[in-house]
Image (cartoon, coloured by chain):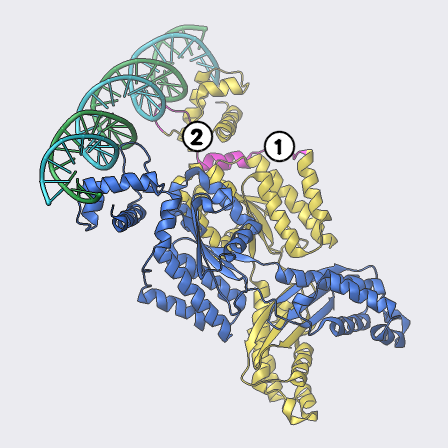
Chain colours: A blue, B yellow, C cyan, D green
Amino acid sequence: MNDSRRAQVLRAIVEDFVATNEPVGSKAIVQRHTLGVSPATIRNDMAQLEAEGYIAQPHTSAGRIPTDLGYRMFVDRIDEFKPLSQAERRAILQLVDGESDLDGMLDRTVRLLAGLTHQVALIQYPMVSQAKVKHIEVVGLAAGRVLVVLITDAGQVEQKIVVLAEAVDEDGLARIRERINAEYAGRRLSRIDARTSQQQTDAEAAAGTPTSTETAREDSADSVPAEATIARIRNAVIDLVAATREERIIMAGTANLARSGQEFGEQMAPILEAFEEQVVLLKLLTSMAEDHAEISVRIGRENTHESFSSTSVVAAEYGRVAGSSARLAVLGPTRMDYPTTISAVRAVAKYVSSALDRG
Amino acid sequence: MNDSRRAQVLRAIVEDFVATNEPVGSKAIVQRHTLGVSPATIRNDMAQLEAEGYIAQPHTSAGRIPTDLGYRMFVDRIDEFKPLSQAERRAILQLVDGESDLDGMLDRTVRLLAGLTHQVALIQYPMVSQAKVKHIEVVGLAAGRVLVVLITDAGQVEQKIVVLAEAVDEDGLARIRERINAEYAGRRLSRIDARTSQQQTDAEAAAGTPTSTETAREDSADSVPAEATIARIRNAVIDLVAATREERIIMAGTANLARSGQEFGEQMAPILEAFEEQVVLLKLLTSMAEDHAEISVRIGRENTHESFSSTSVVAAEYGRVAGSSARLAVLGPTRMDYPTTISAVRAVAKYVSSALDRG
DNA sequence: ATTGGCACTCGGAGTGTTCGAGTGCCAAAT
DNA sequence: ATTTGGCACTCGAACACTCCGAGTGCCAAT
């Protein structure tokens, strides 16, 4: 029993099926690949591969197609990744030269990845849990409505409108701003959450109105903001910090799904539906993060989400900090060109990482 | 020749075809609609309708289906819009009660609209050209890199990272902030653009360094930011103002397209592609704004963009200011339920408008 | 203007029939 | 023990053919 030839046969089947989208027969394999054996031998091998669950027959008198398990075996044994072309490399490098605007960069990246792979590409906002609060701006809009803006030293900006019970004039706002900044500026985002803030508020109350309230006391009564107002702003800040963590995903290339996706047929709608639920995608990426591999691949039903049962996902980590969970991924039909996709994902992740390091 | 009955026949064809997705024959019309005439009469009417281009036959021995022109006639003559159900009304009202966060509200709106119509829904960010600059925040990040944040009194926030030639310390930043705010705060966004700013810079230079430079002169030489730095920040502000105008579109319900979209077949990919190009959608909406109607409808090839040649778009204006170009729209197959769609679009536009008024 | 009648068209569904790619198995060869 | 050639077998795709009926257009009668 020739074990390595069986692996070759499997590889041939995967490659040919990916290329042609038609079941692969024993004769075709002998022709397209130089294995030096006759079709009959291949047939024996195929029978065994089928018994082991790596390949299947759509119907009795047809060739074989890989099962999820077959793809898995293929992916695990990939020896050489298809290197990117010169043009592709150049395209990736241009990414790095672009402006240093994070949003714009991610947007370009995801489009590029979609273009390179002809699949759907996803990219997760890089998480910067180490970031600190740089500044909190409080701006009055209409009466009783203020805009709270959180700015971190990583350059993230989050804003939120807060409705107050009282009208606060410009002086009052200045005081609020001062106090809130004194409280939060410089703190790690990761150390701000509802609990710590609650404690802080309690502590303050117990200590019998410390500095900040003292400041207020010096001023004319009009412009002293009520404690309730401060509390609301404080809550807003906590929400904003949470929003910072709430990760977002940008995607591109859904049209590719429709193209290569005649094979999905009816299945497309649920996939698109899942795309609209960021939560689903986040779950997907986080679950893949747990693989702790440079590149992780989910094939067909390996994806727990039912809608993705005939798609595969190739994901990689990117960003400066090891252990940070920012990821980018490509999603396409199970029948995808894994070597190319994987190397594209890997390359893009690498270059984006270095671009992030630089700026 | 009974003109009004011909209109009725056309209406019957549209309604039945929308309902069943099958060509409508003369007999079927007589059965489903009480027109009080025989099939033969209908046939005569149909022959004429076909001659006039309102309906067509897929093949000789089949019923008729509406042409784009037929749908157009139907839409123009819609007398009664299907009122929304109680549940639908309630769903819309809940929108209004939600939080006052603009982003979140738009997001919920577009999802609701997609749900109500079972189509793709689009909503354009409301344009607030009347807004004024409320505050500009300048925050130092790493050395030589600052984040400029523009805040308007309409609650919009735009940010951008600027790379400077020199390192600026905290005092310098404070000075820049002061000067930039003196220059821009309170100004209408619509009155800020590259030209006016250029003039301003020129004037300043001609007048021999007025107030702002004077302020700088008082201080220790270290923390005086170079003019070049100020100029870069100024450019950033102009960019941010431009970004404010650059309208964005949120969409939801692309999955609906795939569902009802078996009829598109191959056509889906270009549509999805167009969706990814915000520019295309913006063009679409702006061109529809020119209709100056409460509701405007583009049917099939009336859409100039080739990809949308078998889809229809129903759009409405929303937002407080008349003449403002904020729009929301629904896009679906030409064969859509126009009365329902139109009334849903109208209702949502109305409620969103009032919600915006309120907060 | 409307209607019933009638001949006509033509797509779709159903039924065979053929064709060939592909298989499994077995006995012979290495 | 593995490989191979040979052979019978299976079954889907493609094609040809028929039949049916929905739907039409036209015309003469009302």
Tell me the number on the disc at residue B65.
2
Q: Amino acid at mark 2?
A: Ile
Q: Is C19 placed above or below A351 here?
A: above
The answer to whether one can see residue B358 in this image is: yes
**In the rendered view, does B228 fall on the left or right side of B320?**
left
What residue is shown at x 29% (from left), y 31% (from top)?
A60
Residue B329 x %, y %: 56, 47
Image height of B289 relative to A105, above or below: above
Chain of residue at mark 2:
B
Residue that appears at 51% across and 26% down: B12
Mark 1 or mark 2, whichever is nearer to me: 2
Q: Give the label on residue B173, or none.
A: none
The answer to if B61 sits in the magenta stretch is yes
Three-letter amino acid code of the residue under disc 1 = Glu
Q: Can the viewer see residue A24 in this picture?
A: no
- Which residues, given as a range, are shown in magenta? B59-85
User: Is residue A3 magenta-colored?
Assistant: no
Residue B222 image point, x, y percent = 64, 92
Helix, strand or loop status at disc 1: loop
**Direction from residue B205 to residue A181 in the image, left or right:** right
Labels 1 and 2 within one chain: yes
Q: Which residue is mark 1?
A: B80
**Residue B256 location (% of width, % of height):** 51, 41
